[in-house]
Structure formats: C-alpha cells, structure tokens
Amino acid sequence: MSSDDNLSKKTKSMNQSGAFLQIHIINELKKRNWTVLAEYPIRISPFLDLPAKQPILYTRLLNHLDVEPISFVRAARESMDKTTVKETSIDVIGERIINDDYCFNLCIESKKLDPRFIDWVFFQQTKHENTLRFLMRQHFIKKPVLLKTPKTTKNKETYLTINTIQGELDYPVCDFALSLKSEEVDREYYKSDKTKVDDASRQIIEGTYGFIVDRIFQHVLKGDPQMNRGLTDCFIPLVVTNANLFICEFDENEIDSKSGKIKNEPTYKPVDSLIYECPAPKSVQFPEPLEADSTPEENNAITKWHVLVLSPKGFSEFLQKFGRKSQ
C-alpha cells in the first residue's frame, strides 16, 4: 500500500499543488539559519543600453564626479525596455552571510510534480566540468562584467560578474532535458515534452535576474554598509521538484548513423542533484556588451545560465554540503 492510499482526496490535491514542497523548502532553510523570503515580487525587463549613456549620468561620469544614487537608478530604468515589463514572483529566497565575506542568495522555484510528466531525464550532449557557475557582485573587475554601478555619494563602485564553485558541490552538468509522460495517466506514455524542464529553469533564471537588478537598485538607493566594506553578493538559481530525476548514460557509438536512434538500452541513473545549463530567455539581458576579446567560454557563460535542479532530498543535502563548504 502506498503512502497516498491513506490520504483524502483533498490532501492528495494539496500534495499535487506543491504547497507542502514549498513549506519543506522554507523549513530546511530556517533550520540552517538562512533568512527566508517567500513569494518575493519582482519586475523583469531587459536592458537595451548602458545606464552610463543616459544624459543624467553621462556628464558627471565624464568628469569623474560621484553621482547621486537616485540618478543611477533612474538612468538604469530608462535603459530598460518598458514595452516588455513582466511582473511575477520568486517562490522562495534564502539569504545567508558566510564568514563575513559572502552573502549567498538562493533564488528557488518550487516545482510541483505534474502527474502527467513524472520523470525528468537529463542528457550530457557535450562534456562539462562538474562546476557550478553563478553570478556575483563585488568591488573588483573580473571578466566578463555584466553590470557596473558607478561610485555614488553612498556607495563604492561594484561589478556584476561570473564565478564558479568547485570541490564539494560536485554535481554533473547537463545541457538537454526531456520530461516523460506517466504510464498511469496516459496510454501513450513515454511521449516526451522538452518544455516542462526548460520552462521551470527559464522561469527561475528570469526571477533571479529580476532579483539581482532589484537588489542592486535597493543597495544603491539606501546605501549598503556590508557591500561597502567588501562583502561579495552571490546569486544561485535553483529548481526544487518532486519529479523523478534521471541522467541518461549511453555509449555514443551505439547511436545508429542512419536512423539517429540508440541501438541498445541506455542507463537511466537516478539522481537527487544536478546542474542544468539552460539558455537564458530574451527577457534576461544585462547592459554590458560582449567585448571583442571575450572567449567562447565567457560568451557561453553569459548566454547560458547554470540552474541547480534538486529533489527535496537533494535540496537538504545541498544545504548540508553548502554549510560544510562555507565554514
């Protein structure tokens, strides 16, 4: 007898809604002393130009003068596309300062199990290092720079750049994914759908982008003593789901050259944690242009984000590993 057999229809419906999954995420964060924000509202709009090109900033920056915080924020907003503004929210944000040096912000999409698509299968089309790539805001330049905030009357200069976590967070990196239909709810089961995984990943990429921009604007306007004394702000997007997660492992030589189909059964390795490299949607666009000498790796890091995809168990284990790594 499954655990669901003892539950009422009302409770089964609540389980499918994902309500308890989101509560689990919040409780796991609080148990480990993370500050938690739920249903955080954000506005998403791509940058069309550099804020520094706006007249309100250009003259002062040209003369190496400090700018007023409100002037930067107004210039930045004028540089964004007002015709594509999207309002949404992030399910959960976890924030924690580590060793007085780093403030980590986990932007989390709580993705309920769609009973029609219970299995998420990930592939590694190309080989990747098991390294998590994420965005961070700091006081020194590290290529590539995505967004620069000038020195204001309240704050030092900051640069939004890309960094990596290696070592204990040794999760496989995948770059293609499909969700498979459940045999129990559809006779044409094991038909696949690519949009389920990509939609969840792009939604949290958008949310993280909106949160970063909003956080920068708030820090510039209010002044941020922690950033001014050298704290580094770090941002990691996560999808926590109760779908079944698998990595498809196979020998490339087993793919038939005429049909493009695999000739022998692959291995579907169950996992609780992985990194999904996902192209960012068009709504995610920072203002700094790609430089002529940017490497292919830097270009790829800008256009394709890393999203942590975790089961509820994997999320708990991630917080434990993260805590140990950050001590």
Image (spheres, rainbow, N blue to C red):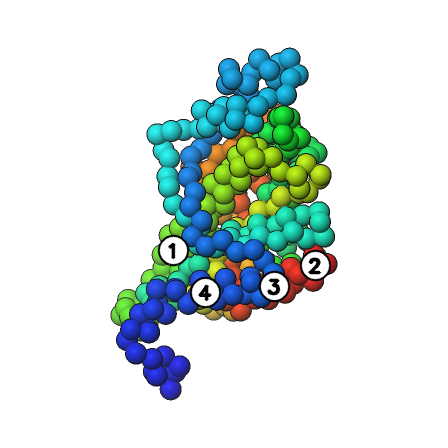
- Label 2 CA crowd tier, 10 Å (few <14, some 14–19, many 20+): few
Q: Secondary structure at mark 4?
A: helix
Q: Position of residue 189 (x, y in %)?
A: 32, 67
Q: Amino acid at mark 1?
A: Lys
Disc 4 + disc 1, Cβ < 8 Å: no
Residue highlighted by disc 4: 23
Q: CA distance from mark 1 to mark 2?
A: 32 Å
Q: Position of residue 304 (x, y in %)?
A: 52, 43
Task: Pick whichever of labels 4 and 1 is earlier in the sequence.
Answer: 4
The answer to whether 324 is drawn above or below residue 302 in the figure is below
Which mark, by number, is residue 32? 3
Q: Position of residue 152 (x, y in %)?
A: 62, 26
What residue is at 59 percent from the left and 43 percent from the top? 135
- Label 1 CA crowd tier, 10 Å (few <14, some 14–19, many 20+): some
The answer to whether 105 is drawn above or below residue 11 in the figure is above
What residue is at 50 percent from the left and 62 percent from the top? 26
Residue highlighted by disc 1: 196
Mark 3 or 2: the one toward you: 3
Q: Amino acid at mark 3?
A: Arg
Q: Amino acid at mark 4?
A: Ile
Task: Pick whichever of labels 1 and 2 is earlier in the sequence.
Answer: 1
Camera-nearest residue between 41 and 118: 41
Q: Position of residue 211 (x, y in %)?
A: 50, 43
Q: CA distance from mark 3 to mark 2?
A: 14 Å
Q: Can residue 126 be seen in this snapshot?
A: no
Camera-nearest residue between 126 and 169: 169
Q: CA distance from mark 4 to mark 1?
A: 22 Å
Q: Amino acid at mark 2?
A: Lys
Q: CA distance from mark 1 to mark 3?
A: 30 Å
